Every structure is written in structure tokens, then in C-alpha cells.
Image (spheres, helix red, strand yellow):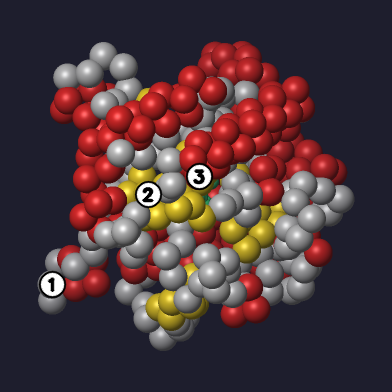
């Protein structure tokens, strides 16, 4: 009997957007901008920071397993019941719980090709057969899937044809959302999901009991009241997106538009995209090559602050 199943042994490591400290070390740079992981360049929600600071002295206690306060708050905000809400260590934490909860040994998975790499890693690690549904012109083929991952909900919801999954409250639909993006809490790991109570009650049996942490629960509750920060984030994103879109067009760079806090650039070859990514790194700007997503000629850029966006465009201009 092998110690490790072959599907784990053959698994490639998750490759995240490069951390700032690593690029600083590698290229001996004093300043680095990270526009690679669609984080919030404004930082964490200030209300969440304050609430977390106040929680520190209570960290000798385990978190509330039921996540009562945050689940109730989410239920009230989105007009559902607490029994329809699940919490997790990021939406990825919930994806992991979903895989462990619902799949029989021989079940197969269906997911979108070229999409969020975290789900691909979890799916591959489950050792099951996966059907990758191709995108239709860079959009999901929604009719073929079940879990709706709305990590960028806060940015996208204002758009007229946004297919809000809350309008599809079928028994087998799970909505996943996160505090990682618009609320600036990616490092904390806190996300949530909505679904029929039968699905939620089973997920609750399987999830790690003390996930999310006490501090993450506290931050989530406080962040939800930080409307000022959310507004500021969305406004920065709209302005930054328009700026980048315009500048990239002026530079003749092809883009794939998005309703989220990133923009994807298209290059004429894998080699060119790799050159651009690497040269930007040398200039202290981390962007995300989409090679691991199956799109080696694409580079994704997160929308940052005005200064970060400007620095990225200036750096790109000198390269082109
Ligand atoms: C589409 C998508 N889903 C989920 C996530 C992960 O979110 P979380 O930090 O809540 O695990 C990301 C993060 O980049 C994402 O892009």
C-alpha cells in the first residue's frame, strides 16, 4: 500500500500570486506593488481592524461553533434564515467542506475550465474525475453547474445583467461569498455560503467545528457594518477600472473586461506574456500570469489604488 495515494503524489502545488516580501528579496527592491491576487489595496475594513483589536484578549477561548452572531447578521442582511447560512475559512474553506460533504466515492465533479484555481486544486485533491465545462466567450456556462461562486459579488451586483444567485434559490444551489475581496480581509480567511437548510445542516456536520476563528467571526460582523469602507472600495474600483481600461486601450493592449476588481490582458503568445510578467516583476510590480489557469497568454491585473494603477501603466509603457 503506498503511503500517499497517486492522485495526491501527482498533484501540483497551488501557485498563488507571488508575495511582496519574496519579490523584494529576489530582486532586491525596496518597494513592490502587488496587483496579482485581487486583494483590496485600501487595506482591511477599519471597523474590522478595530473589532479584531478588541477581541485579542479573548483569544484563549474557542470560537462559537454555531457562528451565531455573524450567521444571524448575514441572514438578516440577505433576507434569509440563519439555518440557510454557512461560514468557513474563506469561500475556499467552504468549497473544501462541500467536496467532503456531498461526494460519494465514485461521484464526478463538474466545474468551469480556466476559472478559480483554488477549486481546481481541491477537486484534484479529492481524486475524483472532473468534467471541465468550457467557458462561453470568457463567461460561465451557468446552466451546466451548481455551486455559484460569487467572490466578487460586491463589485458586480450593480451591473444590470448580473445573475445574482439569490434569484436562484433552488434546493441544489449553493452561493459562496467572501470577506476577502471588497472587505479587504483576504489574510484572515473568512467567507460564507447560502443554501437550502438540508444542505447547510449537512455541511455543518462536516466542516471543521472551530472554523472560522474567533477573530475572523468578529471581523466579519464588524466589516458588514462598514458601509463607508465598502463604498470607498467600490468607488476606487470603478475609477481604477476605467483608468486601466482606457490606458491599456491607448497602448493597444487587448483586454477581457470584468465586473470585478481585476482586468485581464491578452498577449499574442505565451512567450510574450511570460516576458511581460517577468519584466514587471523586475520593476517591482506583481501581476498574475494565468498559465496555471490554462491561459498562458493572459495576464490578470488587480485594480489597485490610483498610484498603483499609474505605476503599473508607466512600467508597461516602458516595456512596450
Ligand atoms: C473566483 C474566486 N473564488 C474564490 C476565491 C477565494 O476566496 P476566499 O479568499 O474567500 O477563499 C477567489 C480568490 O481569489 C476567487 O477569485
Counting from the top left corner in percent of width and height, residue 104 is at 47, 80
Instruction: Using the image as rendered, state which of residue 240 and residue 124 is in the foreground.
Output: 240
Residue that badge 1 annotates? 2
Asked whether residue 170 appears in the rendered view, the answer is yes
Question: What secondary structure is marked by label 1?
Answer: loop
- Mark carried by residue 249: 3
Question: Which residue is depicted at the point 32% across and 23% down?
Answer: 32
Residue 101 position in % (x across, y down): 53, 68
Residue closest to the far left: 2
Is 235 positioned to the left or the right of 205 in the image?
right
Mark 2 vs mark 3, CA separation in Å: 15 Å
Q: With 260 as the anchor, is 71 left or right in this view? A: right
Label at residue 299: 2
Identity of the residue drawn at 68% across and 48% down? 156
Q: Where is residue 290 in the image (x, y as percent from the top left)?
A: 35, 54
Observer-side mark, 1 or 2, equals 2
In this rendered view, identify the residue nearer to me: 111 or 30: 30
Vertical placement of residue 43 versus 299, above or below:
above
Amino acid at each position: 500500500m503506498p503511503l500517499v495515494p497517486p492522485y495526491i503524489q501527482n498533484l501540483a502545488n497551488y501557485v498563488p500570486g507571488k508575495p511582496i516580501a519574496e519579490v523584494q528579496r529576489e530582486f532586491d527592491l525596496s518597494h513592490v506593488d502587488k496587483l496579482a491576487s485581487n486583494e483590496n489595496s485600501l487595506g482591511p475594513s477599519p471597523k474590522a481592524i478595530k473589532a479584531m483589536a478588541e477581541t485579542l484578549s479573548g483569544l484563549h477561548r474557542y470560537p462559537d461553533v454555531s457562528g451565531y452572531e455573524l450567521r444571524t447578521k448575514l441572514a438578516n442582511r440577505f433576507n434569509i434564515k440563519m439555518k440557510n447560512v454557512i461560514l468557513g475559512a474563506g469561500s475556499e474553506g467552504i468549497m473544501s467542506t462541500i467536496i467532503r460533504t456531498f461526494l460519494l466515492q465514485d461521484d464526478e465533479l463538474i466545474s468551469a475550465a480556466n476559472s478559480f484555481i483554488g477549486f481546481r486544486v481541491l477537486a484534484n485533491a479529492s481524486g475524483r474525475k472532473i468534467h471541465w465545462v468550457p467557458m462561453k466567450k470568457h463567461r460561465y456556462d451557468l446552466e451546466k453547474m451548481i455551486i455559484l461562486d460569487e467572490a466578487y459579488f460586491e463589485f458586480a451586483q450593480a451591473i444590470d445583467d448580473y445573475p445574482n444567485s439569490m434569484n436562484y434559490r433552488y434546493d441544489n444551489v449553493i452561493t459562496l461569498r467572501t470577506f476577502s475581496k471588497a472587505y479587504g480581509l483576504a489574510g484572515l480567511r473568512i467567507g460564507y455560503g447560502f443554501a437550502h437548510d438540508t444542505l447547510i445542516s449537512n455541511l455543518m456536520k462536516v466542516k471543521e467545528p472551530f472554523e472560522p476563528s474567533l477573530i475572523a467571526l468578529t471581523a466579519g460582523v464588524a466589516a458588514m457594518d462598514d458601509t463607508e469602507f465598502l463604498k470607498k472600495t467600490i468607488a476606487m474600483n470603478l475609477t481604477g477600472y476605467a483608468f486601466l481600461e482606457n490606458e491599456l486601450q491607448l497602448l493597444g493592449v487587448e483586454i477581457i473586461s470584468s465586473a470585478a476588481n481585476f482586468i485581464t490582458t491578452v498577449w499574442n503568445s505565451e512567450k510574450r506574456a511570460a516576458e511581460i510578467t517577468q519584466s514587471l516583476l523586475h520593476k517591482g510590480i506583481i501581476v498574475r500570469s494565468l498559465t496555471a489557469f490554462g491561459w498562458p497568454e493572459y495576464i490578470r491585473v488587480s485594480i489597485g489604488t490610483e498610484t498603483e494603477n499609474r505605476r503599473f501603466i508607466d512600467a508597461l509603457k516602458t516595456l512596450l
